[in-house]
Image (tube, helix red, strand yellow):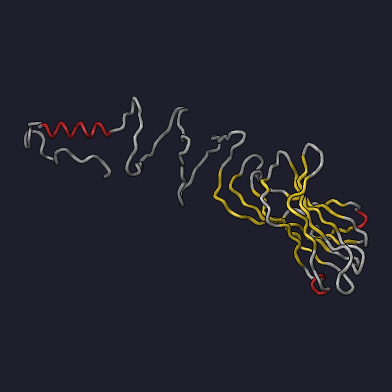
């Protein structure tokens, strides 16, 4: 029901209608006044259906407007929330806008560091080729929004070998390092390249660390993929590493979100 119903239909009041106000009329007036919103003194109401306000809308003035704990303000499909240039929005120190949970895959900027940079060559910022049989290791940094959950890290690699690969195979690990300094901690387990044939080893294939549930804290840590390069046995120069990419679940974008 959009409005209260008329106590008397149009034309039934006044000289051409009924002048007498009955007990039923008074009861009807009282019931409708009881249901009405008290705009001066306030109160609490629980409408049985939503109240839709169109026309010129509502102009909220003052500083006391709020959505109470447990409440929800939903911006429906096709609607917009406009914040003008002079308007602001603020969040608490541990809170931020919450997003519907979704999984994202993102490729990260190629910012490697090396145990010995003379043993590697970077090709057009898209891949690294090992230039030494004893190439040691490299570290690839990745950047994720604060508050998301890291699920997996992947690196696309390609080896060089004479025959079935033997010796030390490539390995991938994931670490977090305190921004204030100190010892890093491994996230998940180390994955070793399981290529069993030369053909499988010498084409692009993934090294992956999966099954993670690491909540990213950019205020406390930085995050890196650590790659131990192959050497020995049938391993040859030319092991190639491409940028890492991650899979993550996002339910919030809080402090430092990007």
**Residue pictured at 46% horizontal, 36% vertical:** 67
Residue 254 % position (x, y): 62, 41
Furthest residue toward front? 189
Which quadrant of the figure has residue 219? top right
Give the left or right position of residue 62, taking residue 98 as reference: left
Residue 68 % position (x, y): 46, 34
Furthest residue toward top? 41
Q: How many marks?
A: 0
Give the left or right position of residue 169, taking residue 62 as reference: right
Which quadrant of the figure has residue 119? bottom right
Residue 221 % position (x, y): 74, 42
**Residue pictured at 91% horizontal, 52% vertical:** 116
Which quadrant of the figure has residue 255? top right
**Residue pictured at 72% horizontal, 39% vertical:** 220
Q: In this picture, is 36 found above or below 218? A: above
Give the left or right position of residue 58, taking residue 17 as reference: right
Give the left or right position of residue 103, taking residue 63 as reference: right
Q: In this picture, is 159 found above or below 138? A: below
Q: In this picture, is 159 found above or below 87? A: below
Query: Which one is in front, 37 or 138?
Result: 138
**Residue pictured at 79% horizontal, 57% vertical:** 172
Query: Which one is in front, 207 or 95?
Result: 207
Residue 253 % position (x, y): 61, 44
> Could you tell me which quadrant the N terminus lies in?
top left
């Amino acid at each position: 029901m959009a409005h209260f119903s008329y106590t008397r239909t149009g034309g039934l009041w006044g000289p051409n209608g009924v002048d007498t106000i009955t007990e039923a009329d008074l009861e009807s007036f009282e019931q409708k006044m009881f249901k009405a919103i008290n705009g001066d003194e306030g109160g609490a109401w629980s409408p049985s259906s939503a109240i839709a306000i169109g026309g010129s809308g509502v102009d909220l003035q003052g500083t006391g407007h709020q959505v109470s704990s447990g409440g929800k303000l939903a911006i429906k499909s096709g609607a917009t929330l406009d914040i003008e240039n002079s308007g602001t929005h603020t969040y608490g120190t541990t809170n931020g806008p919450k997003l519907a949970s979704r999984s994202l895959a993102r490729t990260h900027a190629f910012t490697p560091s090396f145990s010995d940079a003379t043993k590697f060559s970077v090709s057009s910022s898209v891949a690294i080729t090992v230039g030494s049989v004893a190439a040691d290791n490299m570290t690839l940094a990745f950047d994720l929004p604060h508050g998301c959950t890291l699920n997996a890290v992947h690196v696309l690699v390609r080896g060089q070998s004479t025959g079935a690969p033997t010796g030390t195979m490539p390995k991938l690990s994931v670490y977090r390092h305190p921004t204030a300094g100190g010892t890093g901690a491994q996230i998940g387990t180390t994955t070793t390249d399981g290529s069993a044939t030369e053909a499988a080893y010498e084409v692009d294939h993934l090294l992956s660390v999966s099954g993670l549930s690491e909540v990213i804290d950019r205020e406390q840590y930085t995050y890196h993929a650590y790659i131990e390069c192959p050497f020995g046995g049938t391993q040859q120069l030319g092991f190639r590493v491409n940028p890492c990419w991650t899979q993550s679940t996002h339910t919030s974008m809080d402090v430092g979100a990007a």
